[in-house]
Image (tube, rainbow, N blue to C red):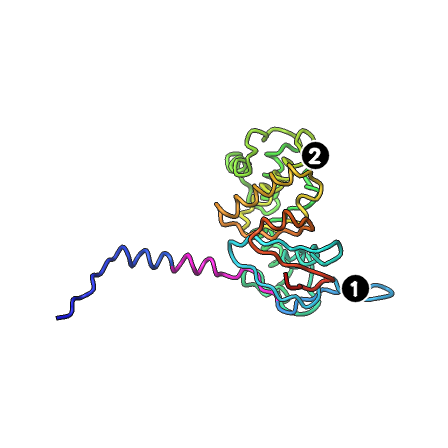
Amino acid sequence: MTRETEHHPSRDADDRSVGRASAREAEVLVRASGLTKAYELPAETVVAVNAVDLELRRGEFVSLMGPSGSGKTTLLDLIGCLDSITSGSLSVFGRDVSTAGENQLVRLRRGRIGFVFQDFLLLPELTALENVQLPPVFARSPIGRSEAMGLLRRVGLEARASHLPRELSGGERQRVAIARALATSSSLLLADEPTGNLDSRNSEAVYDTLSRLNEEDGLTIVVATHDERLGSLTGRTVRLVDGSVVPS
């Protein structure tokens, strides 16, 4: 007589949980196909992004690498819905960017995408805490002091909440900018040369913060950088030359 296989409900639940986790890990947040951005100048047409095929999946930490003028910033702007595409296709969180209206793109940027820039762009007259609280106000979803403090805690700067930007180091200012980028519940963080104005020690502190947010919170992060050493710390590298993706 054949022995029946034992049924373990808890094991089935675990299997379903693993299946859901795998599906989340495989979820494509950004899909570009033949993505092109060209600028029409009086004497010439400049192709900044040239027929790029790219997928970004939930939970990835990706670096866009290449020399100045290779198209890194333009590609970030397209992914972040800050600029319009010339040709090809681009979907962000399942939304076809080429057919979305401006109001839809604004809601997408404000609610799903966080931005970090090389020059920090903190308001000098506001404290670190107030800078973090500012973006949700524009998104019409203000956050309280405790929530903003929690974001500063996530980047290791709770003790600096009452300090003005001029009272912070460059690395601390950039970490405040990261906390500010997360204040609108962003699940995709786009960082353009976030360590470009920092020394090596502060650069490593910023990358440590980004790595921790990626590993512990599952935050999807795309960083544009020309620093090979820092770029190697991410999970995947996409290399750009003259607006095109080239093999690593």
> Dot 1: what SS?
strand
Q: Is residue 148 above or below residue 62?
A: above
Q: Earlier in the sequence, mark 2 or mark 1?
A: 1
Q: Quadrant of residue 247?
A: bottom right
Q: Is residue 153 above or below residue 214?
A: above
Q: Would you name the residue on which mark 1 appears?
A: 46
The amino acid at mark 2 is Pro
The amino acid at mark 1 is Val
The residue mark sitting in front, 2 or 1, is: 1
Mark 1 Cα-neighbour bin, 10 Å: few <14, some 14–19, many ≥20: few
Residue 27: give x, y in percent of width and height: 49, 61
Q: Is residue 148 left or right of residue 227?
A: left
Most foreground residue, 24 or 128: 24
Q: Would you name the residue on which mark 2 appears?
A: 124
> Dot 2: what SS?
loop
The quarter of the image holding the N terminus is bottom left
